[in-house]
């Protein structure tokens, strides 16, 4: 019994195409290259992005390399003229100084100049030249790098990514002059300088000790913390959003995440109390400062560039090179007599334990102490 199969025109076309591809494959190999594997989550936070809701993440980075050395906003040029697209638009007058000031709330220069391995601020075109690498989302061309760098913040804060916000149309190509943004308005934007509070008192949900007293100036002036050390990964939209209400405060988890960088091993009572805490006093560490140490800045004893932590209490930890020739004993308030001035430090301070009372038994066997028989004369020192 013969059977007849009826194939529609569309299906017939598909079958013919499959047969043709098979025949081509037998003679010349595959005609289509394998598409590169791309992790969509680099750019999108949802599984099914759409044109209406692209759910874009912040621009992915190949490497977050902080700029070597410390840079200040005062070093930044005020205005940069970006003219790589002058055949399509007028030059972009970019307020570099303003953006550098805002970047201080994030990662500083590295917020934009994310790859500067040799310590200098590299121009973008060194890595993002031409059309870029289409198989590497982390290294787009110059046009893509500029737009990906700028659009995320403009979209989040202004909810407006119209080209005219940055690009001045070329003469004769402006179809809607009324919508053009005056570049002088963009250049002139400046944030009012925020005053630094001396302290802030928070009332938390911790029932036993709900009060947290935070001395802001103490952290910046005494402990030399920068704004970015606490206000990391923040941007304008954290306080400003033209469509959404401003979020009043961080969550409990977010607050603890900010403080735990320095207080990870501290007890809750370090910050929490039932009433306001007084400002920091060095005596609270168990080491009251004498008149000489009290004159020093914190970094005079605590290494620069490192988090301030508890030091060893032994004087030799910092003063291991003291000897009778380079140390004037009079600064302690005791002027040594001629006999003791010739002695070595270790004759009285056994094992160089200067923080302990001197031991007279090395030379004297009559049981005397430095209190009973001082090795010199006590004098008034400069307060």
Image (spheres, rainbow, N blue to C red):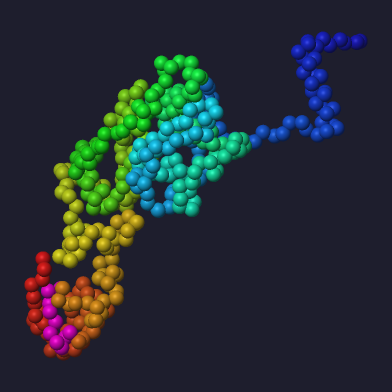
Q: Quadrant of residue 232?
A: top left
Q: Position of residue 380 (x, y in %)?
A: 8, 72
Residue 12 in magenta stretch: no
Q: Quadrant of residue 287?
A: bottom left
Identify which residue, 241 or 49, lies in the foreground. 241
Identify which residue, 258 or 75, lies in the foreground. 75
Q: Position of residue 80 (x, y in %)?
A: 42, 37
Taking the spot 17% from the left edge, 84% from the top edge, the residue there is 341
Q: Quadrant of residue 366?
A: bottom left
Quadrant showing the N terminus: top right
Residue furthest to the front in view is 171
Q: Which residues are magenta?
A: 332-341
Quadrant showing the C terminus: bottom left
Total marks drawn?
Answer: 0
Q: Is residue 213 left or right of residue 39?
A: left
Identify which residue, 192 or 75, lies in the foreground. 75
**Does any portion of residue 338 appear in the rendered image?**
yes
Q: Position of residue 242 (x, y in %)?
A: 34, 23
Relative to 276, is 36 above or below?
above
Q: Is residue 28 left or right of residue 382?
A: right
Taking the spot 31% from the left edge, 24% from the top edge, the residue there is 245
Taking the spot 56% from the left edge, 36% from the top edge, the residue there is 141
Q: Position of residue 253 (x, y in %)?
A: 33, 39
Relative to 319, is 177 above or below?
above
**Does any portion of residue 45 appear in the rendered image?**
no
Taking the spot 24% from the left edge, 75% from the top edge, the residue there is 353
Q: Is residue 314 left or right of residue 147?
A: left
């Amino acid at each position: 019994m013969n059977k007849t199969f009826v194939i529609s025109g569309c299906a017939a076309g598909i079958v013919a195409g499959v047969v043709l591809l098979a025949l081509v494959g037998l003679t010349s190999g595959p005609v289509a290259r394998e598409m590169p594997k791309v992790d969509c989550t680099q750019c999108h936070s949802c599984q099914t992005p759409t044109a209406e809701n692209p759910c874009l993440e912040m621009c992915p980075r190949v490497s977050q390399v902080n700029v070597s050395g410390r840079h200040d906003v005062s070093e930044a040029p005020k205005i940069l003229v970006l003219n790589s697209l002058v055949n399509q638009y007028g030059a972009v007058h970019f307020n570099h100084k303003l953006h550098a000031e805002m970047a201080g709330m994030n990662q500083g220069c590295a917020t934009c100049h994310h790859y500067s391995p040799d310590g200098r601020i590299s121009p973008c075109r060194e890595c993002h030249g031409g059309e870029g690498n289409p198989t590497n989302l982390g290294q787009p061309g110059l046009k893509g790098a500029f737009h990906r760098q700028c659009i995320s913040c403009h979209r989040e804060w202004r909810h407006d990514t119209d080209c005219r916000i940055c690009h001045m149309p070329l003469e004769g190509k402006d179809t809607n002059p009324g919508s053009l943004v005056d570049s002088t308005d963009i250049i002139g934007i400046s944030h009012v300088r925020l005053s630094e509070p001396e302290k802030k008192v928070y009332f938390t949900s911790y029932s036993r000790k709900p009060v947290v007293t935070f001395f802001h100036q103490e952290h910046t002036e005494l402990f030399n913390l920068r704004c970015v050390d606490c206000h990391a990964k923040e941007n304008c939209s954290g306080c400003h959003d033209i469509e959404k209400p401003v979020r009043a405060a961080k969550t409990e988890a977010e607050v603890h995440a900010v403080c735990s960088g320095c207080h990870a091993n501290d007890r809750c009572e370090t910050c929490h109390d039932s009433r306001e805490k007084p400002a920091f006093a060095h005596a609270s560490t168990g080491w009251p400062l004498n008149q000489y140490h009290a004159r020093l800045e914190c970094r005079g004893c605590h290494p620069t560039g490192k988090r301030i932590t508890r030091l060893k209490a032994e004087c030799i930890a910092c003063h291991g090179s003291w000897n009778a020739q380079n140390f004037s004993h009079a600064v302690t308030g005791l002027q040594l007599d001629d006999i003791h001035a010739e002695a070595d430090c270790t004759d009285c301070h056994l094992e160089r334990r200067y923080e302990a009372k001197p031991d007279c038994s090395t030379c004297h066997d009559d049981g005397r102490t430095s209190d009973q028989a001082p090795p010199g004369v006590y004098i008034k020192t400069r307060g």
